[in-house]
Each structure stands twice: as C-alpha cells, then as structure tokens.
Amino acid sequence: MKLYISIFLVVVLLVIFIPIQNVGLNLYANTTNPVGFWNGLWHGITIPVVFIVSWFTDTNIALYEVQNNGFWYNLGFLLGINSWAALKFNLVKIRTTL
C-alpha cells in the first residue's frame, strides 16, 4: 500500500511542477539571469514526461532551456537524464516491500 501512495505522490508532484518547464516560445527571454544547475537537473529529470506531453499539446514545449549559463546547466541536465538511466539499468536499487 505504501508503494501505491508513493507512486501517487510522485505523479501528483510531477503534474504540479511540469508546467514550470520552459514553454519554448522564448518571447521574453531572460538573458540577464540565465538558468543554472538546479533548473538543468529538473529539466533532465522531467524530460521523459515533457517529451510525451509535447506530443499531445499544440504549444511548442522545449526539452532544453536555451537561455542557460553553460557548463553548470549542462551538468545538471545530464545528471537528470542519467538518473533515468540509473533506474533503468538498476544502478540504483529501490526497495519495495508490500
């Protein structure tokens, strides 16, 4: 039962926080304050969900923030994407007990 509650909470949090992702239009690009490591990490973690959402919406949802600060954003983005690979290849063990 705890597993189902955990999964439900993760889904609810993703639904709440996915709209934070860049819409991709960049009409008001903020070049004076580019995004950094933490936004890159978040964008990397949410990329599978955002990619699927982009199939079913009419707006252009960007998978990568263009207005970034370079190395730190890219590092966070790669770590976020690699978190999915770690789960896929069981590099991170998730303990499930029912």
Image (spheres, rainbow, N blue to C red):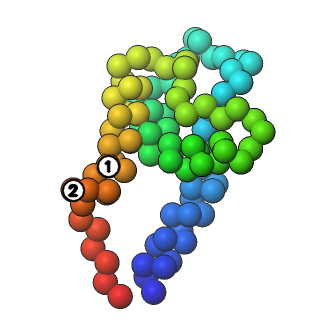
Quarter of the image where one finds residue 58: top right
Which residue occupies the foreground of this view, 98 or 58? 58
Residue 47 placement, left or right of 81: right
Question: Image quadrant for the N terminus?
Answer: bottom left
Residue at the front extreme of this rendering:
55
Q: Do the residues labelled 1 and 2 touch (CB within 8 Å)?
A: yes
The numbered mark at residue 23 is none
Count residues near mark 2 (Cα–Cα under 10 Å), then give few for <14, some for 14-19, many for 20+: few
Residue ID at (60%, 63%): 12
Residue labelled with disc 1: 85
Up-down relation of residue 88 to residue 94 (above or below): above
How far apart marks 1 and 2 lie (CA) works out to: 8 Å
Q: Which residue is drawn at 61% across and 31% down?
A: 62
Q: Quadrant of the C terminus?
A: bottom left
Vertical placement of residue 47 versus 14, above or below:
above
Q: Please provide percent x and percent y for residue 21.
A: 60, 38
Q: Position of residue 72 (x, y in %)?
A: 36, 24
Number of numbered tags placed on the structure image = 2
Instruction: Give the x, y percent position of residue 24.
Output: 66, 27
Q: Mark 2 points at which residue?
A: 91
Front residue (pair 81, 28): 81
Disc on the earlier residue, 1 or 2: 1
Answer few, some or many: residues within 10 Å of disc 1's Cα (few below 14, many 20 plus, some between 14 and 19). Answer: few
Question: In the visual, does 77 lie left or right of 56?
Answer: left
Please tell me which residue is depicted at 56% across the width and 63% down the height of the picture: 11
- Image quadrant assignment for residue 97: bottom left
> Which structural element holds mark 2?
loop
Q: Which amino acid does label 1 sit on?
A: Ala
Please give the name of the residue rendered at 57% of the width and 55% of the height, measured from the top-left corner: 14
Instruction: Give amino acid for label 2.
Output: Leu
* Dot 1: element: helix
> Is 2 placed above or below 66 here?
below
